[in-house]
Amino acid sequence: MITLTLLHPLKSVAVQKWNFEPNSVIRIGRANDNDVVLYSAVVSRHHLEIRPRGDDWALVNLGSNGTFINGKKINKVLVKDGMIIRLASSGPKIKITLSQEVESDTSKQGQQSKRQPLTSKDISKETVMN
């Protein structure tokens, strides 16, 4: 399972989280047809994709404003657990968490749908960013 956490722009605390199943292509951008929709002027309509690649995930930049890791613009990179990406040089930050899901009789997480918000407070896939 892969978890994306939108971080507060000033405090680096979680604002919203999304869970995705392995083998799902995750699309992030401003357009409503993305899996994660972020309304920010610096986020492209189709900004980036996170794609399964064997046992790993690959992050592929699609946006004209770029995707950054530690201030460095990237085009394609393997995802590492705990990495923080930034959409555009001054845009939203997203933390990526990878987990090895161990299925047991009492725990079958993530089987209801591809996309699962972790909080009941905001079940929308859309987030407004200023």
Image (spheres, rainbow, N blue to C red):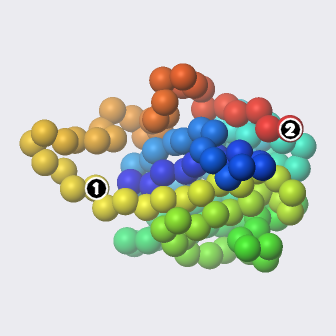
Q: Earlier in the sequence, mark 2 or mark 1?
A: 1
Whole-percent x, y for residue 92 in the image: 76, 50
Q: Is residue 38 above or below residue 66?
A: above
Any part of residue 35 in sight: no
Instruction: Give residue 15's mark.
Output: none
Q: Is residue 26 visible?
A: yes
Q: Which residue is mark 1?
A: 101
Q: CA distance from mark 2 to mark 1?
A: 34 Å
Return the residue nearer the eye: 17 or 114: 17
Image quadrant for the N terminus?
Answer: bottom left
Q: Nearer the viewer, residue 12 or 73?
A: 12
Residue at the location (72% across, 65% down)? 61
Residue 70 location in percent, x, y? 73, 73
The residue lying at 80 percent from left, 45 percent from top is 45
Query: Could you say where residue 79 lies in the image, as x and y percent from the top left?
Result: 54, 70
Q: Nearer the viewer, residue 78 or 81?
A: 81
Bin the neighbour count of mark 1 within 10 Å (Cα to Cα): few under 14, some 14-19, many 20 and up.
some
Disc 2 residue type? Answer: Asn
Q: Amino acid at mark 1?
A: Glu
Name which residue lies at 39% across and 49% down.
21
Residue at the (37%, 71%) spot, across then down: 55
Residue 80: x %, y % from top left: 52, 72
Residue annotated with mark 2: 130
Q: Is residue 103 left or right of residue 97?
A: left
**Quadrant in which residue 72 is drawn:** bottom right
- Mark 2 or mark 1, which is nearer to you? 2
